[in-house]
């Protein structure tokens, strides 16, 4: 039996949230073991990484006591990042974590599978150009077609702006196979509005009167519906 964790690594997971609600900000900071000031410096993906590192990866260890754990990342597609085999008795107790949550096994001991998985996750960046949530979930479901799955934990800010399949339709397919999805929302539910031009590409040299073809990448945050923008 296995549990799947799917982590959003699209560009929107790189946003820095500025929670307006002080209680929400304080509760989030406390759960992550950081100050409110430090919380403001952590983007969404960094918060996910920190949450999974808490207490030496305690949550992952609990899952891996009775399950094989497969971790996927996704944006426009999906990629299996790593997996943790069901832990043996000697693997279930975590080495003492450092102040920043990092875990290093003592000299002479076998590598800690949870610490290895967390190290792989630490190298992930929020650089996906788009989020195809439905398509990505469908590909994960296809990967799991011949395996027994207890459930999936989905960590995402919920933004989907690409792909041909809706997340709702694919979630129904998971349900038909008896696979429950626990969706964990990441980020401020009411983020501030922000627009930025992240990339612009065009020929370096042209002649007067030429028609140029270029591309521009505009990132938006806090706008509930798409809008046309004159450039």
Image: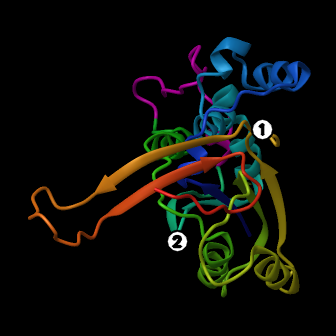
Question: Does residue 98 belong to the magenta stretch?
Answer: yes
Q: Position of residue 231 (x, y in %)?
A: 46, 56
Q: Nearer the viewer, residue 49 or 186?
A: 186
Q: Position of residue 82 (x, y in %)?
A: 51, 57
Q: Position of residue 213 (x, y in %)?
A: 27, 70
- Label 1 vs 2, first from the N-terminus: 2
Mark 1 → mark 2, Cα distance in angstroms: 24 Å
Q: Nearer the viewer, residue 220 or 116?
A: 220
Disc 1 and disc 2 in contact, CB within 8 angstroms: no
Question: Does residue 205 belong to the magenta stretch?
Answer: no
| Residue range highlighted in magenta | 88-109
Secondary structure of residue under mark 2: loop
Q: Residue furthest front?
A: 209
Residue bearing mark 1: 188
Q: Nearer the viewer, residue 77 or 131?
A: 131
Q: Position of residue 144 (x, y in %)?
A: 65, 80
Q: Is residue 198 shown left or right of residue 210?
A: right
Using the rendered view, name the quadrant where residue 215 is placed.
bottom left
Main secondary-structure element of the magenta-colored stretch:
loop
Badge 1 crowding class, 10 Å Cα cut-off, few under 14, some 14 to 19, many 20 or more, is: some
Q: Which numbered mark, 1 or 2, is in the foreground of this view?
A: 1
Query: At x 75% / y 74%, what residue is drawn?
Result: 167
Secondary structure of residue under mark 1: loop
The correct choice, above or below, for 201 with respect to 122 in the image is below
Q: Is residue 49 shown left or right of residue 54?
A: left
Q: Nearer the viewer, residue 210 or 161?
A: 210
Query: At x 77% / y 55%, what residue is drawn?
Result: 224
Residue bearing mark 2: 77
């Amino acid at each position: 039996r296995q549990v799947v964790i799917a982590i959003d690594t699209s560009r929107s997971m790189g946003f820095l949230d500025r929670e307006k609600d002080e209680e929400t900000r304080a509760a989030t900071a406390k759960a992550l073991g950081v100050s409110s000031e430090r919380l403001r410096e952590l983007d969404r993906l960094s918060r996910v990484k920190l949450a999974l590192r808490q207490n030496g990866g305690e949550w992952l260890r609990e899952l891996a006591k009775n399950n094989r754990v497969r971790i996927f990342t996704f944006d426009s597609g999906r990629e299996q990042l790593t997996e943790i085999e069901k832990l043996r008795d000697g693997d279930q107790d975590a080495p003492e974590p450092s102040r920043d949550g990092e875990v290093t096994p003592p000299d002479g001991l076998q590598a800690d599978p949870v610490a290895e998985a967390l190290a792989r996750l630490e190298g992930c960046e929020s650089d996906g150009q788009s989020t195809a949530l439905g398509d990505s979930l469908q590909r994960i479901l296809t990967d799991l077609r011949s395996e027994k799955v207890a459930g999936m934990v989905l960590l995402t800010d919920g933004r989907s702006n690409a792909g041909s399949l809706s997340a709702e339709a694919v979630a129904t397919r998971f349900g038909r196979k008896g696979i429950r999805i626990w969706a964990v929302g990441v980020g401020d539910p009411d983020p501030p509005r922000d627009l930025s031009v992240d990339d612009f590409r065009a020929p370096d040299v042209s002649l007067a009167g030429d028609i140029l073809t270029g591309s521009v990448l505009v990132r938006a945050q806090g706008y509930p519906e798409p809008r046309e923008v004159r450039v």
